[in-house]
Amino acid sequence: MTRGALFWVVVALMLAALPPIASAFGQPFYIDLVRRMMILAIAATSLNLILGYGGMVSFGHAAYLGLGAYSVGILAFYGITSGWAQWPVAIGASALAALAIGAVSIRTSGIYFIMITLAFTQMLYYLGISLEVFGGDDGMRLRSRSQFSGLIDLGNAVRFYYLCLALMLLTIYVTYRIVNSRFGMVIRAAKSNEARSRAIGFSPYRYRLTAFVIAGAICGLAGALYANHTNYITPGLASWVQSGDLMFMVILGGMASTAGPMIGAFALLIAEEILKGWTEHWQVILGPLLVLSVIFFKRGLAGIFERPHA
Amino acid sequence: MTGALVFEQLLNGLQYGVMLFLMAAGLTLVLGIMNLVNLAHGSLYMIGAYLAVATTQATGSYVAGVAVGFAGTLVVGMAMELVALRPLYGRDHLDQVLVTFGLILFFNELIAIIWGRGSLYTSLPAWLQGHVELFTGSRYPVYRLVVLMVGLAVAVVLWYVVTRTRLGMLIRAGAANRTMVGALGVNIRLLYTVVFGFGAALAGLAGLMAGPIYAVQPGMGELILIQVFVVIVIGGIGSIRGALVGAIIVGVVDTLGRAFLRPVLATVISPTAADAAGPALASMLIYLLMAVVLALKPAGLFQSR
């Protein structure tokens, strides 16, 4: 067994073992916490596809988290509680929004790209705030969790946990396959040398846009999961702080690495939990920590476990 | 909807526009010359507002508050540049975004520790209160007019400094080719610190003037920062003229949209539908405008490079 495969077997076994252990110690809180980590790991993994491999510094990835969550919430609001309908809509709406935002923003690069993705996400955030029907600023309760014809009961914390685990591993695997396909190679080539990839006959725009849409769609799924996780949906899910958090997860874990976003998501949320235990003003410590980690810890945590791609 | 009301809202839009300009001018120079993305520019706006309000409350003097707010932000800005941003000049934009994002978390929380999470309110001195009658039946707050004047005065001063002085020459040269400016023997590091402090002070000025109009609270800087990004994207990075034009456009469009989109829509579609769609569309207006500008001119209206 290769080192990489061994790593994933250990990760899967450890995460699979958590619910029985947490239940045995009477600490269901940890099931909830790790479930949230895994959902955000899905979102971070999707961001890594465009940020880490594609070199597109999207500061607006939370938009799709919010869109996915609101798709579930709004359909539930109108009485459509079937997850078979809700989740595809969440994924589809996010993909569509990513297509529109990507079509405009990928025409630009550098600072413009960062500011534009941020601005469009902020637009969706304000849209969420101004929709009084769906709670506006305060957000809305999810009327009932998504129904899967009695197949999976999301109300059962442990079963929902295992669904999130399965989806997270699937997302990481799919992203891995995409990155190592011909398509993924074009994306990576366009990042490392755009002129050269043009010279050998690839127009990066279409490839980048496709990657942008795929990343948005996956993040929409994470949003649908998040809505079911918290049972409550607020515009804050699409805020720029959330976008920044997702970026930090990718950077902290290690850009352009398979396990990086997951490790980063876990590390950031664990750090938050620890700091929250210390002080109400945990952000005053977290902020400088993040600054230092960017300045001095370039490779990310995943560098400890695996070799990053070029 | 009377003519007087439209005129009043137009003035509000202009007043908001010049505030956006004060923020955008500093940020666009930093982006253009140093090639640095500074998200914490909004924090400087917040710091300016808080320093001014706190000083006014402590001393009872509005003028002292303005002075401390302005000078204090200048000092904080230069310190920020020296401590946190210098290591970032050679790094890519991603690192700059992340570091300045970390700074925002820090400053917002620091302000919350010192002054609490609630909004602070401040009162104006007697000579800034009251209204002026612009024409019959239209009374406009003196303070907003003063803000508008100060903003326009700063625009003129900036124009003079950038186009008519040696410092301005260096700034323009730095925006065009900073390696060459350095090679010609200009102390680029000092220039960076001066320009950054200058931009920070303008952000502080915007913040301290915003205090009596909008809520002074932690996180207030980020609300305006993202609109300032829209201004810069529309105007073109590194261009002061672009920042002014972009800021006025965004300020006026945003203000008029919020004031009149709902009643205008109500004449076309049913009032209840307009009640729902009006505010939503109004909040999206400037971003849609940005998308249109980008589709036509991807590098903004006034491209400097």
Image: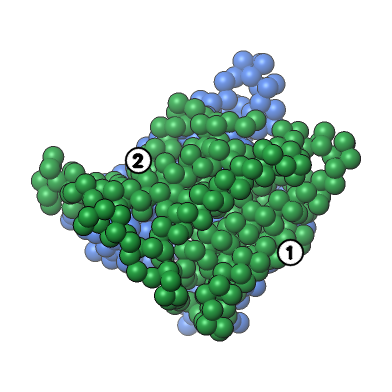
Chain colours: A blue, B green
> Label 1 belongs to which residue?
B79
Residue at (45%, 54%) from the top-left corner? B148
Residue at (37%, 59%) from the top-left corner? A235
Chain under disc 2:
A
Whether residue A79 is visible: yes
| Neighbourhood count class around disc 1 (C-alpha, 10 Å): few under 14, some 14–19, many 20 upward | some
Residue A151: x percent and y percent?
A: 30, 56
Closest to the observer, B92 or B10: B10
Closest to the observer, B146 or A11: B146
- Would you place residue A91 above or below residue B149 in this image? above
- Would you place residue A288 above or below residue B225 in this image? below
Residue at (64%, 19%) from the top-left corner? A198
Quadrant where the C terminus of chain A sits is: top right
Q: Quadrant of residue B39?
A: bottom right
Chain under disc 1:
B
Q: Quadrant of residue A11?
A: bottom right
Residue A15: x percent and y percent?
A: 55, 63
Q: Give residue B200's mark.
A: none
Q: Answer with left or right where residue B40 lies relative to residue B11.
A: right
> Label 2 belongs to which residue?
A92
Q: Callout 1, which amino acid?
A: Ala
